């Protein structure tokens, strides 16, 4: 069991210390002890293949073919039937057998004596359900409502069946919910104001573009399969431009790379627009027939924007802005992909509105191979059957209460009527992934009971009272779609659940059973059922029309994967926008309703406080997805610890040399990290990647503050977060 191993690590203010970092080196290459059996040549071995779906919060959402011999996974690879996965997995996906058979998996339900003590004891599922159910019923009795129970669930696993966590809590009454998303809210609101919703075209259509701008996106790391289509376009002669303050691996593939001043992309787009208006390079027919408010917008631009001004703001020479404007406006079709990283700013939404305007006025929206591509949800039309059971009869109240997932700690502490007393955490690691984890911890301290369902002992599990072991995708069934490509993937059960792990759906049924035993009628969630029957309940006419399959079984037999038809894959091809006017809105009343300027105007970037002059950007890491993958042995052997990237000139100013330990400080907390000197980072910025490295008390969020982005309320119910408007100071430790 885990006691000894995990009690070493405690959650302290500050973070990765020098000693914990130095203690690391040896961990990476730990031998496997035969955890993944080699393929047996014996003819007696039972061998089969299964379709699985990678369910992580990733653009690529891959279809996997899993080979199982004698009940163990021996090989995995990408599914050739899925033309986006194209038979290949990313570096993380290829390590899945190490994830499944990792000795670090949580094996049994456990209870911790003393939160954060590491003093765990194994308990049975029945004991776990009993403790949790009794607490739920006690809270309901004491407060006459279940609002003191809070669910924080997000992106560890996007299998449609995993909405059972939401469904189970809805089945006990009204509860408090972490609402919103850290990924995309500002940009999604921008697109909702302009077009009615965010809706991207099929990334496989990059091959049909004549010109591509990757704008604050790093797909070489965060959407590796998209790069194939971009490379194909390049081979045909398409120009690839990358705009990013950091010289990323994606930038290294570009024909032209533009190192922009961070958070000034709105000025860049508006500068291009000024040039395009002056030279009449836009598409008047498109603008006249399919939009409203263009004249007001053009007047704003002529009055307020010059290319010289844009050059000054962005740090990009005027001639370059003009040339990119001309190239973009004269290519047909031209394609823009705006990444989520670009909008993690206090002016993020307004920057996306300016880029939308550029794409729209040049007639690129609605064209195959073109578009302003950001995110989409067209294929998510399942029944969400797991969420269809209402509260028990006689439940009083007006509905659930919401706190912003992006400022979770502070808002939980503020929710006082009634206070939050119990936390259910699934598919989330808030003590590492959220800003200001020390505030989140304070909110945790207020709880009577914290229950976390997870695969591994991450920072949040370590600070929980009860941990419930969950299955990997290979151990249960499911179905997944992407927020980017247009494929639907079946997930089959390839192996039996390891140890005592259960899926979140099975946990929901088990808890409902216990609640109903203790107090009949207290939970409306079904108490038993075969997950395969549940997954079948997700299919409907809408899914059939889009994908041509009527059931999970059919999808499975169809090669495990199927693509939506062309009616949906080219965004806005009918040019019927989902705005109040039905047209593209350069002028948006809806934006005004939400407190913004009606036009895509320039909004100034966040100003660095005097004491903390350096921008800290914390982008997504190539060998992990948030708290997942990087901590496994193969990936630890490639990257054994996190680093702080900084420019050699900045390092020199602070007397810092390669591998020196650097203290990164601001008023939220501090971190110590070894320096990695690189000219890929601008001189006013430091970069620390998001991730969880095994046995290191690191989260980049120790000094990331909960600063909201400008938009998010309209489409997500909550503002997004300006992760990259975070400022620090550094010193040699
Ligand atoms: N390997 C891997 N893949 C992932 C993830 C992961 O953690 N690891 N996470 C998944 C999830 S949940 C998400 S939300 C997506 C994120 O996907 P991306 O948006 O591609 O990734 P980010 O790393 O957040 O940011 C992309 C780039 O934005 C740049 N950027 C920051 N500020 C600005 C700015 O002001 N202007 C411009 N032009 N660029 C800026 C950063 O330097 C960074 O290179 O990736 C998904 N895919
Ligand atoms: N500083 C900084 N912080 C960031 C970001 C950033 O750019 N900078 N990006 C933010 C973004 S965009 C995102 S999306 C968030 C992501 O943050 P989270 O939503 O917390 O995502 P993960 O760490 O991928 O997953 C959380 C946990 O889910 C567990 N899990 C996996 N499968 C299952 C399952 O089937 N059931 C259950 N119950 N658990 C499972 C994993 O083991 C993991 O511990 O991080 C945010 N944090
Ligand atoms: Mo995300």
Image (tube, helix red, strand yellow):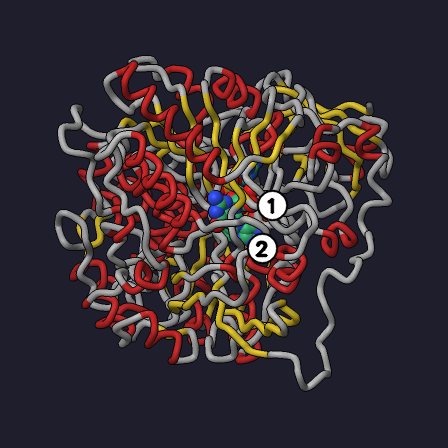
- Left or right: where does residue 108 sit relative to residue 426? right
Looking at the image, residue 622 sits to the left or right of residue 635; the answer is: left
The answer to whether residue 318 of the structure is visible from this angle is no
x and y percent of residue 221 in the render? 60, 56
- First in sequence, mark 1 or 2: give its number: 1
User: Is ligand 2 less than 8 Å from the beta carbon at label 1?
Assistant: no
* Callout 1–callout 2 Cβ contact below 8 Å: yes
Q: Position of residue 179 (x, y in %)?
A: 35, 34
* SS at circle 1: loop
Label 2: how many Cα within 10 Å (few below 14, some 14–19, many 20+): some
Residue 111 percent across, percent down from the top left: 56, 30
Between 69 and 82, the one lying in front of the other is 69
Label 1 Cα neighbours within 10 Å, binned few <14 / some 14-19 / many ≥20: many
- Horizontal and vertical percent position of residue 572: 25, 63
Residue 106 lies, with reference to residue 334, above or below; the image says: above
Q: Is residue 632 left or right of residue 527?
A: right
> Position of 376 compared to 699: left or right?
left
Give the residue displayed 35% in from the left and 17% down from the top. Answer: 415
State the residue position of label 2: 498
Which residue is tagged 1? 107
How many angstroms separate mark 1 from mark 2 (CA)?
Answer: 8 Å
Assign the C terminus to one quadrant of the image.
Answer: top right
């Amino acid at each position: 069991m885990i006691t000894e191993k995990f009690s070493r690590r405690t959650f302290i203010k500050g973070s990765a210390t020098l000693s914990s970092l130095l203690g690391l080196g040896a961990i990476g290459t730990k031998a496997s002890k035969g955890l993944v059996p080699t393929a047996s040549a014996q003819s007696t071995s039972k061998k089969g293949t299964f379709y699985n779906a990678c369910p992580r919060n990733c653009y690529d959402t891959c279809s996997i073919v899993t080979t199982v011999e004698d009940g163990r996974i021996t090989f995995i690879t990408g599914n050739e039937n899925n033309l986006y996965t194209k038979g290949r997995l990313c570096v993380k996906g290829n390590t899945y057998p190490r994830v499944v058979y990792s000795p670090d998996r949580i094996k049994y339900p456990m209870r911790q004596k003393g939160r954060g003590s590491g003093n765990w004891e194994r308990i049975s599922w029945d004991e776990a359900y009993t403790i949790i159910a009794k607490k739920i019923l006690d809270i309901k009795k004491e407060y006459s409502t279940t609002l003191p129970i809070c669910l924080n669930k997000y992106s560890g696993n996007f299998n449609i069946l995993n909405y059972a966590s939401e469904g189970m809590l809805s089945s006990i009454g009204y509860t408090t919910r972490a609402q919103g998303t850290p990924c995309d809210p500002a940009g999604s609101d921008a697109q909702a104001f302009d077009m009615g919703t965010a809706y991207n075209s099929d990334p496989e259509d990059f091959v049909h573009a004549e010109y591509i701008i990757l704008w604050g996106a790093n797909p070489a790391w965060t959407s590796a399969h998209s790069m194939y289509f971009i490379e194909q376009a390049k081979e045909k002669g398409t120009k690839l431009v990358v705009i990013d303050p950091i010289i990323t691996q994606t930038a290294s593939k570009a024909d032209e790379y533009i190192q922009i001043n961070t958070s000034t992309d709105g000025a860049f787009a508006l500068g291009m627009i000024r040039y395009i208006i002056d030279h009449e390079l836009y598409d008047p027919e498109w603008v006249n027939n399919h939009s409203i408010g263009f004249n007001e917008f053009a007047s704003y631009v002529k009055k307020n924007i010059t290319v010289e001004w844009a050059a000054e703001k962005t740090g990009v020479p005027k001639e370059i802005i003009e040339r990119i404007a001309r190239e973009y406006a004269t290519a047909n079709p031209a394609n823009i992909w705006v990444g989520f990283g670009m909008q993690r700013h206090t002016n993020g939404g307004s920057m996306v509105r300016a880029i939308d305007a550029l794409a729209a006025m040049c007639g690129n929206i609605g064209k195959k191979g073109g578009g302003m591509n950001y995110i989409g949800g067209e294929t998510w039309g399942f029944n969400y059957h797991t969420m269809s059971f209402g509260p028990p009869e006689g439940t009083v109240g007006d509905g659930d209460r919401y706190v912003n997932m992006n400022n979770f700690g502070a808002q939980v502490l503020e929710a006082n009527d009634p206070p939050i007393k119990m936390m259910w955490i699934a598919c989330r690691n808030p003590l590492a992934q959220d800003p200001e984890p020390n505030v989140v911890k304070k909110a945790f301290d207020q709880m009577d009971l914290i229950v976390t369902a997870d695969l591994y002992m991450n920072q949040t599990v370590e600070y929980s009272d009860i941990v419930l072991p969950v299955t990997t995708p290979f151990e249960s069934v499911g179905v997944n779609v992407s927020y980017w490509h247009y494929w639907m993937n079946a997930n089959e059960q390839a192996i039996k659940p390891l140890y005592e792990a259960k899926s979140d759906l099975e946990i929901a049924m088990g808890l409902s059973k216990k609640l109903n035993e203790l107090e009949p009628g207290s939970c409306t969630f079904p108490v038993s059922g075969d997950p395969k029957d549940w997954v079948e309940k997700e299919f409907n006419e809408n899914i059939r029309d889009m994908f041509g399959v009527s059931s999970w079984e059919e999808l499975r037999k169809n090669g495990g994967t199927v693509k939506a038809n062309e009616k949906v894959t080219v965004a806005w091809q009918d040019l019927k926008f989902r705005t109040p006017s039905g047209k593209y809105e350069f002028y948006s009343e809806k934006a005004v309703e939400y407190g913004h300027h009606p036009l895509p105007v320039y909004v100034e970037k966040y100003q660095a406080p005097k004491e903390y002059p350096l921008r800290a950007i914390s982008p997504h890491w190539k060998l992990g997805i948030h708290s997942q993958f990087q901590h496994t042995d193969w990936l630890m052997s490639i990257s054994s610890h996190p680093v702080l990237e900084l420019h050699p000139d900045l390092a020199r100013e602070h007397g810092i040399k390669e591998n020196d330990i650097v203290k990164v400080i601001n008023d939220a907390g501090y971190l110590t990290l070894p320096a990695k000197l690189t000219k890929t980072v601008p001189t006013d910025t430091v970069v620390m990647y998001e991730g969880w490295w095994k046995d290191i008390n690191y989260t980049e969020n120790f000094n990331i503050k909960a600063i909201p982005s400008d938009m998010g309320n309209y489409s997500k119910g909550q503002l997004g977060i300006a992760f990259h408007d975070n400022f620090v100071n550094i010193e040699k430790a």
